[in-house]
Amino acid sequence: MRRFILSPSLLSADFGNLRGELEALEAAGLEWVHWDVMDGLFVPNITFGPPVIKALRASSKLFFDVHLMIDHPERYIREFADAGADLLCVHAETGVHLERTISAIREAGMQTGLALNPATPLNVAEYLLPQLDMVLVMSVNPGFGGQKFIPFCKEKIAALSKMIRERGLSTLIQVDGGVTLDNARELSDLGADVLVSGSAFFGHPPYAGRYQDFQRKMES
């Protein structure tokens, strides 16, 4: 039986009370939380980095799903490992030595993820799939929260799911961007295992109720 995961994006949380937000997510029954790390170069915005993650790691049991939207992520693998990231996801568009970067993430003791922008073809990830714990299909162009889902990404999710099944792999498919209650069921049916939701989650407290709403949609 497939297990569906909701990973709320802290990009839409209260930055002035991140510790409280993590505690509230845990109390609501969530298991994962999504950290959108932005450098102002690969994407326009700047968010948080290893010091913030490290400061909150000790007080949270949540699985830290860390998404690096930064140039040259290979420079910071050890820093994020030391900060307490459980999974480190890098963008295929950020470097030419992806296999080396993915191997370094594994060697640092973290699970491995590869993110693909909407227009990036799946064949970029094809040969790396056996080394990946997760592929993140970006369904908006990265850098800002609250964007609308790009429709052609549905075909991409389905094609990736077929590729993983045909190769007998257990690689998770994560979808990030424009994920709402209205499309959660369809995305799950297409093959998504992990849904990232920002404003559509944090903007609708209480978190326990919102989480249950997503679970019902994803598992029905």
Image (cartoon, rainbow, N blue to C red):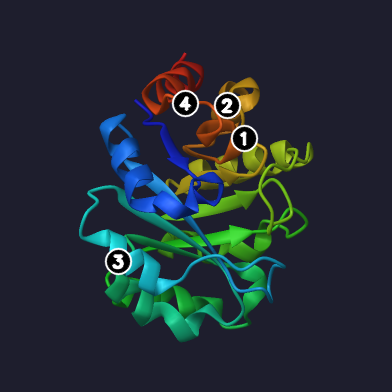
Which residue in the structure is indicated by mark 3? 55
What residue did someone put label 4 on? Answer: 205
Left or right of 141 in this view: 5: left
User: How many residues crowd mark 4 within 10 Å: few (<14), some (14–19), many (20+)?
Assistant: few
* Mark 3 burial class by Cα count in 10 Å: few <14, some 14-19, many 20+: few
For marks 1 and 4 on the same chain, the one whose residue lies earlier in the sequence: 1
Q: Residue at x 64, y 76 (%)?
A: 94
Q: Choose mark 1 or mark 3, whichever is in front.
A: 3
* Mark toward the start of the polypeptide (1 vs 2): 1
Q: Amino acid at mark 2?
A: Ala
Tag 4: amino acid: Pro
Using the image, determine if residue 135 lies above or below residue 37: above
Residue depicted at x 68% and y 57%: 142
From the top left corner, tell me how far across and down residue 209 is, in percent.
41, 19
Residue 87, picture quadrant: bottom left
Between circles 2 and 3, the one closer to the viewer is 3
**Distance of mark 1 from mark 3, alpha carbons?**
28 Å
- Mark 1: amino acid: Val
The earlier-in-sequence mark between 2 and 3 is 3
Instruction: Tell me which numbered mark, 1 or 3, is placed earlier along the sequence.
Output: 3
Q: Which residue is mark 2?
A: 184
Residue at image mark 1: 179
Q: Dot 1: few (<14), some (14–19), or many (≥20) neighbours within 10 Å?
A: many
Residue at position x 29%, y 66% in the image:
55
Residue kind at label 3, given as amino acid type: Ala
Q: Tag 3's secondary structure?
A: helix
